[in-house]
Image (cartoon, rainbow, N blue to C red):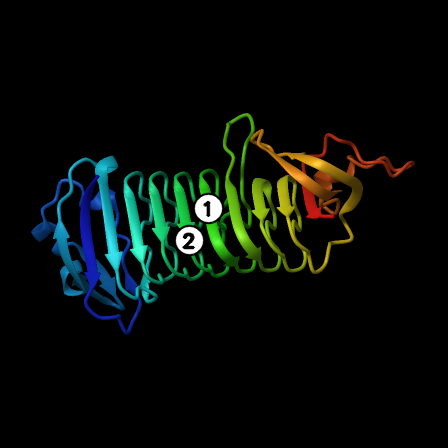
Amino acid sequence: MVEIKLKLKKKPELPLEADIITPDNFVGKSVADIKKLELYYGKEVVKLGDFFDISGKSTDINDTKIIIDGDLSNVKRIGENMSGGEITINGNVGMHVGSQMKGGKVTVNGNADDWAGAMLQGGELEINGDAGHYVGAAYRGFWQGMKNGTIKVKGKVGNETLAWVNGSKPGKRFPKLICGSAGAFLGIHSHGGIIIVEGDCDRCAGADQIRGAIVVKGKVTKILPSYKKIGEVGEIELPNGEKLTGKFIEYSGDHSVDKNHSKIDKKTGEISKSSNGRLYIAA
């Protein structure tokens, strides 16, 4: 794989809007051309070469890997809308990393700020530290968030992660998140997401969930009363056909959502197995 290396000269004092840093925008360009690419620094239009030392070359998009070194915690939107290739960030990174990406892979060897992988359409985002709020979530005003691909966060994700996630078994779209631990309202408004939490989760996981599966291998601070306990299970089959083994308590919900009301027999209180919204918590 052909590499293009970027080294931050100095941490920006203001947020640097770096959505032009993608294999899509670098492919076929010389280093001199890449240095001339424009981006916003506050209200000013600046050149990429004003902030980064750049070396290497690019050929085919899927054979291009961008490696970025430095404290990028004030650099936003790296990898936005990318469709192929790779980006490796060696350090912390700012908001919107990998947002709306359609393919390829972004690896962050550090922490990521809010909205990482927001509305992800495909590809893979891997964060080897913590991530902020709204990971993979829908931006305000949109009702469909992450639709496909995978997000892996080694540490903790913040509140409202994977809000409005939208998967489709007929469409073979299985958006998936794996994280170390999670904040409140994980998977809120889920319409078919797969979420696996290796540790603990804060309150109200799966609020307003219609479809999908949330698996918490640790504890949940507070389970919503609109979730109905089904019982203990030793194996979980996720919407994508993947199976997990262990001792879990299975819950169905969120039954405060109109689409799920008919899934409970009003006379017996029994829950129909056709209800796809599931929350599993370690027994």
Considering the numbered disc 2 on the image, is that residue within a helix, a strand or a loop? strand
- In the rendering, at what x and y percent does residue 273 appear? 75, 31
Q: Residue reaching furthest front?
A: 246
Tell me which amino acid carries mark 1. Answer: Ile
Q: Which mark is residue 197?
A: none
Q: Which residue is identified by label 2?
A: 127
Q: Residue reaching furthest right?
A: 267
Considering the numbered disc 1 on the image, is that residue within a helix, a strand or a loop? strand
Residue 161 visible? The answer is: no
Residue 151 visible? The answer is: yes
Rendered view: 206 above or below 62: below
In three-dimensional space, the C-alpha distance between marks 2 and 1, rounded to whole angstroms, equals 8 Å
Q: Residue reaching furthest bottom?
A: 13
- In the rendering, at what x and y percent does residue 198 appear? 58, 50
Q: Nearer the viewer, residue 150 or 81?
A: 150
> Quick check: 37 left or right of 159?
left
Rendered view: 174 above or below 32: above
- In the rendering, at what x and y percent does residue 54 appear? 14, 56
CB contact under 8 Å: marks 2 and 1: yes
- In the rendering, at what x and y percent does residue 161 appear? 54, 53
Tell me which amino acid carries mark 2. Answer: Ile
Rendered view: 42 above or below 263: below
Locate the N terminus and report the quarter of the image it occupies. Answer: top left
Q: Nearer the viewer, residue 278 or 218?
A: 218
Q: Which mark is residue 151?
A: 1
* Among the two numbered marks 2 and 1 on one chain, the one whose residue lies closer to the N terminus: 2
> Quick check: 262 left or right of 143?
right
Q: Residues within 10 Å of mark 1 (few under 14, many from 20)?
A: many
How many numbered circles are shown?
A: 2
